Image (cartoon, helix red, strand yellow):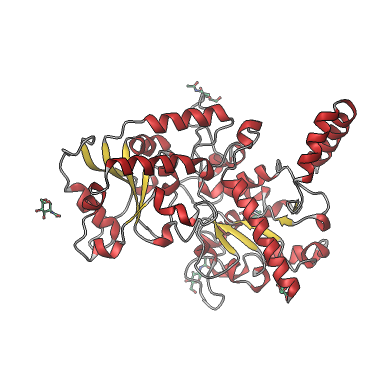
């Protein structure tokens, strides 16, 4: 609200002294039609108190406190770094909240808003159920929030029965999809199974195929530039980087004896010799990220990714992985083994018709149970096509990064992952509200 009133003061000053600026601002105001968002005020137990408890969970060996720095970007990788942070994706809820505070069409009146943002740190609140003492009452996750929404200014919720509400859940939806009938629970909370929240749009890292209200948005990478020159410099570095390795797998797993795609990649990779395929000196490389060693140390995998043409994105515990976005950031063409890993997930950020232009698809069954060799598929792609695909990767890169809060106006003029998520959420809510009111 402070931001909104500051805007009006600015607007009045500008309107009085600089008529041309004033008309510009009027144009910007007009652009808010259909885009007004009200940020629901929540008691601190639903967000900031959860940050204060950052050392209470046995996560990341000690605590997640360092990752709350810089409004969820984490600590800088080096003191003099301007764009690189040790970002943990669990903190996207905080990062998203901070960015929403500078959203240009905030409304201070919920009844004039097109959508209501719930700044609830749901994945952080879920920790006590996932790893903590309340594991056996995980069906409670969300009930406290719902009763707050129904009792405090109840008209905000009831105006559209929650259909205009949205929130961010910084984990795969599976972690919130425990059937209410599981007693004791096996894994996850039941937030997304509660009838109370079935009308709310949930932005997750991985959605289940059927619920309409779940939508996957990109995992944050470690790159959060504050201005356009820094983004452009990175794009130039990525475009001119010498790629001497044909393919790279940065990850863990694949060491079990049972057949799976990670194991197939590892075996094939370890069995490749040096390459006589120009311009590569190596056909395949593995960066071992077992035990989470890469997670907060982007240098470990960004450097090899910058030197590789293709980056493998095999499913792990679930089909999606953050590494997909790291590889796009590095201009390394992602290789997918199932549609659930990205194609059917990030439909807002990767236009369906362009998907094949920046990625390779190799069905995992043909590799694990068939005779198909991954290297044969990649080596058969002509080098002009590899270059073209990489250009496309670099072209979509700005759409998957989360820029820093307080970015320069120049960078703000380019839509990043969050801008696209918000724009598409507004569209979906509009369609949903129209559908429901027509019933
Ligand atoms: C923070 O941790 C304390 C002690 O474990 C607990 O009593 C409190 O409910 C927690 N606060 C939140 C908001 O989870
Ligand atoms: C980086 O900054 C921290 C905190 O300001 C300081 O303690 C540390 O000495 C600095 N490191 C270098 C290499 O300048
Ligand atoms: C949860 O329930 C299971 C099975 O009833 C029990 O073994 C376990 O100790 C319970 N955990 C906690 C933290 O209460
Ligand atoms: C969800 O929407 C339906 C249809 O508009 C409505 O009947 C129902 O009460 C809503 N659920 C909640 C929990 O508000
Ligand atoms: C390794 O490669 C050689 C020659 O290409 C092949 O004969 C052999 O079967 C491969 N080994 C494994 C474990 O795939």
Find residue 192 and report its image quarter.
Answer: bottom right
The image shows residue 168, relative to residue 99, as above or below, that is below
Q: Quadrant of the C terminus?
A: bottom right
Q: Where is residue 129 in the image (x, y as percent from the top left)?
A: 55, 62
Count of marks, rendered view: 0
Question: In percent of the image, x 80 and y 44: which residue is there?
Answer: 1
Quadrant of ligand 1: it is bottom right
Residue 259 appears anywhere in the view: no
**In the image, what residue occupies the spot 78% across and 40% down?**
27
Please identify the residue farthest to the bottom as the structure is shown. 181
Q: Where is residue 89 in the image (x, y as percent from the top left)?
A: 51, 47
Residue found at the very far front of the displayed protein: 384
Q: Where in the figure is residue 128, as x and y percent of width and height? A: 57, 59
From the viewer's side, name the closer residue of 247 and 391.
391
Q: Which quarter of the figure has residue 384?
A: top left
- Does residue 343 appear anywhere in the picture? yes
Q: Is residue 144 left or right of residue 181?
A: right
Q: Which residue is found at the position 59% from the left and 30% from the top? A: 227
Q: Pick whichever, 139 or 420, lies toward us.
A: 420
Q: Where is residue 8 in the image (x, y as percent from the top left)?
A: 85, 38
Would you place residue 245 above or below residue 176 in this image? above
User: From the viewer's perspective, is 297 left or right of 424?
Assistant: left
Q: Which of 439 and 100 is in front in this view?
A: 439
Quarter-of-image position of residue 238: top left
Q: Residue placed farthest to the right in the image?
A: 16
- Quick check: 10 above or below 337? above
């Amino acid at each position: 609200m402070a931001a909104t009133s500051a805007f009006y003061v600015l607007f009045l000053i500008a309107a009085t002294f600089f008529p041309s600026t004033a008309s510009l601002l009027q144009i910007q105001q007009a652009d808010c039609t259909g885009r007004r968002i009200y940020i629901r005020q929540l008691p601190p137990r639903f967000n900031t108190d959860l940050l204060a408890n950052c050392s209470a969970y046995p996560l990341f060996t000690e605590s997640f406190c360092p990752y709350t720095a810089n409004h969820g970007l984490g600590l800088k990788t080096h003191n003099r770094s301007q764009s690189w942070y040790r970002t943990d994706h669990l903190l996207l809820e905080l990062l998203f909240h901070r960015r929403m505070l500078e959203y240009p069409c905030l409304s201070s009146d919920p009844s004039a808003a097109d959508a209501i943002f719930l700044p609830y740190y749901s994945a952080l609140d879920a920790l006590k159920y996932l790893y903590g003492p309340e594991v056996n009452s995980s069906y409670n996750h969300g009930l406290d929030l719902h009763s707050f929404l129904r009792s405090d200014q109840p008209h905000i919720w009831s105006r559209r029965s929650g259909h205009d509400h949205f929130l961010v859940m910084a984990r795969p939806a599976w972690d919130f999809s425990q059937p209410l009938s599981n007693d004791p629970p096996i894994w996850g909370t039941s937030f997304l199974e509660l009838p109370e929240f079935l009308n709310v749009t949930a932005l997750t890292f991985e959605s289940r195929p059927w619920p309409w209200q779940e939508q996957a948005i990109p995992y944050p990478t470690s790159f959060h530039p504050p201005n356009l020159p820094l983004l452009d410099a990175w794009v130039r570095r990525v475009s001119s980087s010498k790629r001497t390795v044909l393919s790279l797998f940065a990850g863990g797993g694949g060491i079990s004896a049972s057949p799976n795609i990670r194991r197939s990649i590892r075996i094939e990779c370890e069995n490749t010799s040096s390459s006589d395929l120009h311009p590569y000196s190596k056909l395949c490389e593995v960066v071992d990220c077992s035990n989470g060693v890469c997670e907060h140390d982007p240098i470990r995998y960004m450097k090899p990714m910058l030197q590789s043409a293709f980056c493998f994105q095999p499913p792990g515990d679930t089909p999606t992985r953050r590494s997909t976005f790291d590889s796009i950031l590095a201009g390394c063409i992602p290789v997918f083994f199932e549609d659930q890993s990205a194609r059917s997930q990030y439909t807002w950020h990767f236009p369906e018709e362009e998907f094949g232009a920046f990625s390779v698809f190799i069905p995992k069954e043909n590799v694990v149970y068939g005779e198909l060799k991954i290297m044969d598929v990649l080596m058969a792609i002509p080098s002009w096509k590899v270059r073209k695909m990489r250009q496309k990767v670099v072209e979509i890169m700005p759409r998957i990064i989360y820029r820093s809060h307080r970015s320069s106006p120049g960078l703000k003029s380019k839509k990043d992952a969050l801008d696209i998520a918000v724009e598409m959420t507004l569209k979906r809510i509009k369609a949903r509200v129209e559908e429901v009111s027509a019933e």
